[in-house]
Image (cartoon, helix red, strand yellow):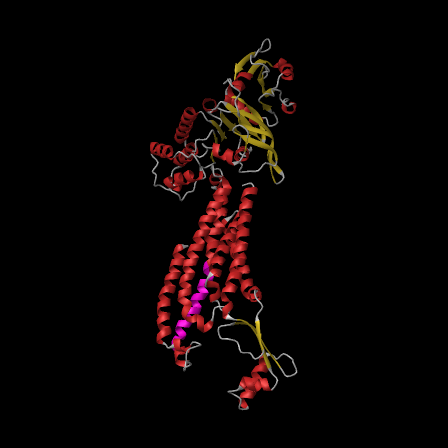
Amino acid sequence: MLSVMGLGALVLLLDGRSMHSAFTSSGMINCLPGHEAGYCGAALDAFRPAQDRVSQLTGLCLALPVLYGLFLGAPLLAREYESGTYRFAFTQGAGRVRWLIAKIVLLSSFTIATTTAFTAVVMWWYSPLVPLTGRLGNTIFESYGAVFVARALFAFAVGIAVGALLRRTVPAIGVTLGVWLVVVISTTVSLRQNFLTPLNTLNGTVPSTAWTVSSQWTGPDGHALTGNQVADLQYRAAEGGHKLDLGQYLADQGYRHLASYHPESRFWSFQAIEAGGLAAVSVALLILAIWLVRRRAA
Amino acid sequence: MTAITEPGLALQASGLGKRYGSTWALRDVELAVPEGRVIALVGPNGAGKTTLLHLAMGLTVPTAGEVRVQGGLAAGSLAALSTVGFVAQDAALYPNLSVADTIHLAHNLNTGFDVSRAHERIAELDVPLGCKVGKLSGGQRAQVALTLALAKRPRLLILDEPLSSLDPLARHDFMAALMAAVAEDGISVLYSSHVVSELERVSDYLVVLSGGRVQLADEVDDVLGTHWLYTGPVAEADRIAADLPVLRDRRTDVLAYLLVRSTGPQAQPPHGWEATRVGLEELVLAYLRKPRTTVTHGALELTAKGTAL
């Protein structure tokens, strides 16, 4: 566990150094909003390899929290039952509830400490890109900050509760992986965007760092346009000589670009909502596991 | 074996039963075993021995009735767990922990754990402290488990099949260590076994379990004092068998050999019959072969169902 996280952090540290220097040397630093706008094409090209690596590495970081569920949480009780060592653990003077609480406190502290350290590295590693791409509508959301820690804690709690129910290690690991994936994916895909009410704009101008949750063109008659129709419209407008004032021209024609988005300033609110929700569910699952161990015969 | 003061009960069960699915692993168990005894729980495999011991440790929840240990403490309660030591079948220690770490763990999990005593015993046994428990021999592992249970300074020690996986030498050493500890601390011991030899030497209270029911539960001395082998003419055998509970009935053309439980302490065989004492092993086997006989301490009458063979 530690070695996986340590290795991951090392990779990020090494890559971070090269990315930070690439960021400066490529001139990307001058392309950021607020800086004097220069010509950024060359800088973007120079920086692209670094950015590709970033997206690969954030993809890898996504999977790390579930390891705490698979290797720490699921076997915690399941292996005791499976190998029969519960007969030792549950018959000591401390009793099974104190034994389990001690294990939970120790291992969840370990989980929180190591993931916090790891995400601190992620935050440093990703820092140059924050003003460029934002952190909300981006896979970095899951590895950056409290959500990363909460996802690991959640995996750990699911693992313990499933292990208490199934009492067999391999099935517990499988079910833990399944539950974690379902919750995490459904949160990312459909729940998160409803945490807060998105802001709306009628002219389609959304900050580059914001998370656009919906984007829709309507025609002068108020009907929604399909993607093909929009592309066609833009092509004909450009052909008609409105390449540079495309937005204004279409607006004058009665076309509206409605967009809903969450601004980057909401990042920590989103983190707090998602991490808080996962932490609350985790605590409930841990209480369930303690209750199962207390109530059920071994 | 006579109690001077009224002793507490080491093990007490009333109406105790445990059902797994639709089969009863244990049923209608009534026990009242006094403290200060070495109690042997014998029975064939699948008789319900482990179930009874797990119930006594609170590892299993009874379907019916209740079980109490060490002077009326509820099985599995914190008070019971801190005063009752348990050695599970095959020791059930963590194979990847070293002996020293296992002692450390037991120390953390028990108040009043005697670490120095545990280390002393391990040193006496020549078990390497740094060795992983999984790499020890079966005999060494059993000794480590016994050491941990004793270092807890229990008043009652419960052992589930402590001898089953040991070779004869390790078996002897284990029992010697156990008996020494009993003599030293005056604790009660409840151990299960499917081995019926040597029972007489190492136990002074006997519980025979078969088919999930208690067949016999009494002091060993009382058991030996009330069971006789009556030998006499086969023609009178039916008359004798009608008066006395017969455990085993063997007849030749001329002679009948009746293993009986006499009602009083002094056996007066009928005229023309000869009474001889029976060894404990033979007695236990007779009870195990006779599945529906129940004798418990203080209730000397046999249930009538199984008396006629």
The quadrant of the picture occupied by the N terminus of chain A is bottom left
Q: Nearest the camera: A37 or B133?
A: A37
Image location of residue A85, percent across then percent down: 47, 41
Residue at the spot 55% in from the left edge and 13% down from the top edge: B275
Image location of residue B33, percent across then percent down: 54, 25
- Please, is residue B148 above or below residue A128 in the view? above
Is residue A166 visible in this depiction of the protein?
no
Asked if the stretch drawn in magenta spans residue A62, the answer is yes
Q: How many marks?
A: 0
Image location of residue B129, percent across then percent down: 34, 39
- Find residue A49 and report its image quarter: bottom left
- Please, is residue B58 above or below residue B284 in the view? below
Asked if the stretch drawn in magenta spans residue B51, the answer is no
Residue at the spot 46% in from the left edge and 63% down from the top edge: A143
Q: Which residues are magenta?
A: A46-64
- Find residue A23 and report its image quarter: bottom left
